[in-house]
Image (cartoon, rainbow, N blue to C red):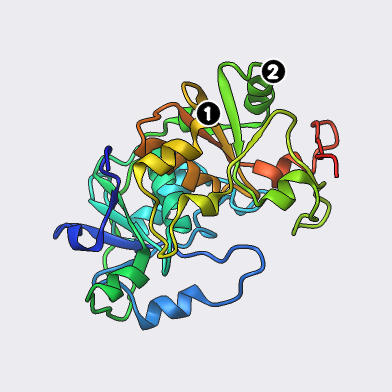
Amino acid sequence: MPHRIVIQPSELPDDYVPLDASILLPGQKGDFDAEFRKSALPGARRFDIDLFSDPNSPLPHTIPGAARFAALMGALGLENNTPLVFYDRSGSVGAARGWWLTQLFGHQGPVYVLDGGLELWRAEGGVPEPGTDATDAKHYQTCPSYRFLAGSGDVLSALSSPECTAVVDVRASGRFRGAQPEPRPGVRAGHMPGAINIEWQYLYDSSGCFVEVERLKELLAPAQDKAIIASCGSGLTAATLVLAARLIGIEEVALYDGSWAEWGSVADLPVEKDAE
């Protein structure tokens, strides 16, 4: 693939630090911290998306402040130029969010996402080890670039100029259309008027790997030749769209961090439902 961000298990570099960014999506159950302790890529550290969020925000998974991000990265024994490989137990939702956060905060070293996650790596002969904590903290310094981040005001502006910017919502079709209730209380059903729906699951094949470049181009065709703002339920799965766009050469793509958890909760923001 162009823009070597996503790599295969056979391409794992020798000098990287693996980061397990697995996270439960709404409706899922499990304990990824416990699973990490049992089996992980050799040398891996646990990149907990919930920790790498703003603890004072009323919204889920809001980006942390630069100081918090730097402290957490340093506590993992990471420096600004440390080569990183993000992965999930399966697929790459958390890994995509972790990758996006490093772009937002200006990580200087190479950052990869492992296609197919731990599951594919094991299927191809990888032997996991118990996950452990970093032994020595390091000094980590951020260099934020907020052009990768969008707020509700940016989305409103984009909706008023669809010829320039496409707002892409990656939630399931039923939620986008307003036919299914939102999993979070107090959040209205529906979508932003003028938004495009590209379900994030369609970016992946049955093995949890990204589909081929040509298929990604087909899926993102409605946003062709435009800037993109990606949105989802809470800013997690939208990162998969940001990553997919980068894989096919779209550079001007931002993530609406509040996503539908914010938009659907604010009475003054417009919401549209599709006719039955």
Q: SS at mark 2?
A: helix
Residue at point 42%, 67% (across, down): 90
**Amino acid type assigned to the residue bearing label 2 in the image:** Ser
Q: Determine which quarter of the picture holds residue 159.
A: top right
Percent of width and height locating residue 44: 30, 68
Q: Determine which quarter of the picture holds residue 265.
A: top right
Residue 184 is left or right of residue 15, and the answer is: right
Residue at point 36%, 61% (across, down): 87
Residue 173 is left or right of residue 249, and the answer is: right
User: Which one is in front, 45 or 255?
Assistant: 255
Is residue 105 visible from the viewing direction of this image? Answer: no
Please tell me whether mark 2 or mark 1 is closer to you in this view.
1
Q: Quadrant of the N terminus?
A: top left
Q: SS at mark 1?
A: helix
The answer to whether 265 is drawn above or below residue 31 in the figure is above
**Amino acid type assigned to the residue bearing label 1 in the image:** Ala
> Residue at label 1?
223
Total numbered circles: 2
Is residue 195 visible from the viewing direction of this image? Answer: yes
> Residue at label 2?
160
User: Which one is in front, 91 or 49?
Assistant: 91
Percent of width and height locating residue 38: 37, 83
The answer to whether 173 is drawn above or below residue 90 in the figure is above
Tell me, yes or no, whether the two marked residues, 2 and 1, touch with CB atoms within 8 Å: no
Residue at point 49%, 43% (across, down): 241
- Mark 2 vs mark 1, CA separation in Å: 15 Å
